[in-house]
Image (cartoon, grey):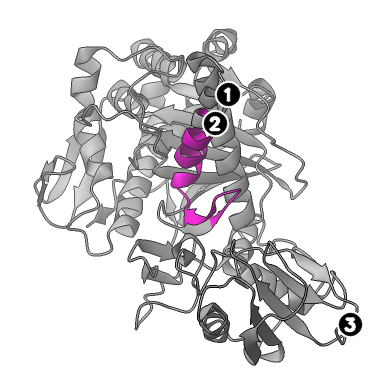
Amino acid sequence: MRAGAAVLAVVVLVITGFAWHSVDSLISNIERIGNLGLGGGRDGAVDILLVGVDSRTDAHGNPLSDRERALLHAGDEVGTNTDTIVLIRVPNDGRSATAISLPRDSYVDIPDLGKGKINSAYGATKETKRLELMNQGVPEADADKQSTQAGRQALIKSVANLTGISVDHYAEVSLLGFVLLTDAVGGVEVCLNNSVDEWMSGADFPAGRQRLDGPAALSFVRQRHNLPRGDLDRIVRQQVFMAQLVGQVLNAKTLSNPGRMKQLSDAVGRTVVLDDDWDVLAFLQQLQDLSGGQVKFETIPVTDLNYLTTSGESVVRVDPAAVKSYVGSLVDGKAAEPESDEPALDPATVTVSVYNASGIGGLAGQVAQALSGKGFHEGLVGNYTGPNVSSSRVLAAKTSDAKAKAVAKALGGLPVLADTTLSPDSVSVVLASDYSGPGSAAGSMFDFSGTSSTTATPVPPAPPIDAGQNGPKCVN
């Protein structure tokens, strides 16, 4: 579901269209959530994580009607999928906004789960936590509420880890919100380079310009199959749709139409969730000079669009350092602050010895090979002859050793322990039976950054799309 961001990108803009005496009423109808671990960043912008959720309930947990479910054409599957993830950066002067799309298959670090697609952070964490709470005897309703919060927290942390941005506010919308908002503005105009007929999304449209109602627009932005660049082309569709929707919301004909504005208000109240620390009224005052031309849509750079893990899973590979630099540069042209003052470490300068304490034949050699694939220099490889160990670790003279930390990160986040018998330049890995990182049978849970495809398909950021252009941009 890529549709949610089209709603989320205009939520605050919708509110600006109301007379001030109506804003309080609208805001009071929005579902609020707390304890998400937000804020803390002082980077010259308000950073909002916008999440589209494939849900069969409204924002208040009420089941959708049969008619509404039929409108979505999304089946009866129950789950929490966050296939739309957008970070909106609004500089503190409030005169512009940049919506940055994160491909749903981006292969990232997920707290407590290892490597995975970023769109799994919410749902996988929620289900893991829900089962844990149910096994502890927590009532189902309470378990669902607590696990949903855990899922949101995991997604927020995953986005922050990837982009280097502290998320200040959180907004979430359902499939129904997309349909209702589209219909509230009288449909949205789009333009296709070629006709399409793709049954999985329901996309069946002629080439050229056309105006789509809510259900048809949902199919338009959900299609990913039969597109040249798959999910990235779907993101482009999403962005041109958002640009048109934003432009129409800010159009005088919409803002001066009481009927349209009531529809927008009802749509936001039923389908949007916001964090409870967000002072929306104060934020609106920052946005009072915002116009369509100052709302732009970008996508993070991708290093390999067709990356395969060793288990055969297709993912989108991204370079966190490149993503952090790119995202940081989108506010006043200033790059993000580096995570530390330490220069980037060249793996070729690190010699690693690997020792097998697991009893699994050949494990040390496989892990040494995996490290070589990541650029590290191979040292000694063999069986471990020291004291018994029950957990895997990286050994160095000091726990603060930068080379040891680099090796530990490359192996899925192993702990670094001090071994005073080692020289200052020595780094060793001891593999116990718990090891499941690169080179192990279960290593697909982690990042095998030695490319598994013969040719990477890098995708640099595309030119931005803005909401101030005349008419829709024609796309695949």
Q: CA distance from mark 1 to mark 3?
A: 45 Å
Place of residue 135 in the rendered image (x, y in percent of width and height, measured from the top left)? 53, 26
Label 3 CA crowd tier, 10 Å (few <14, some 14–19, many 20+): few
Residue 446 lies left or right of residue 208; in this view the side is right
Q: CA distance from mark 1 to mark 2?
A: 6 Å
Place of residue 467 in the rendered image (x, y in percent of width and height, measured from the top left)? 42, 45
Mark 2 and mark 3 lie on one chain; the one further toward the N terminus is: 2
**Residue 357 to residue 91: above or below:** below
Q: Quadrant of the N terminus?
A: top left
Q: CA distance from mark 2 to mark 3?
A: 42 Å
Magenta stretch in the rendered image: 109-130
Residue under the point 51% across and 63% down? 446
Along the line of sight, which residue is nearer the eye, 295 or 432?
Answer: 432
SS at mark 3 in the image: loop
Query: In the picture, residue 199 is in which quadrant?
Result: top left
Q: Amino acid at mark 3?
A: Thr
Is residue 230 in the magenta section? no
Residue under label 2: 132
SS at mark 1 in the image: loop
Mark 1 and mark 3 lie on one chain; the one further toward the N terminus is: 1
Residue under label 1: 136
Place of residue 374 in the rendered image (x, y in percent of width and height, measured from the top left)? 56, 81
Residues under numbered marks 1 and 2 in contact, where contact means CB atoms less than 8 Å apart: yes
Residue under label 3: 421
Q: Amino acid at mark 1?
A: Gln
Number of callouts in the render? 3
Residue reaching furthest to the right = 420
**Residue 410 to residue 126: above or below:** below
Along the line of sight, which residue is nearer the eye, 235 or 262?
Answer: 235
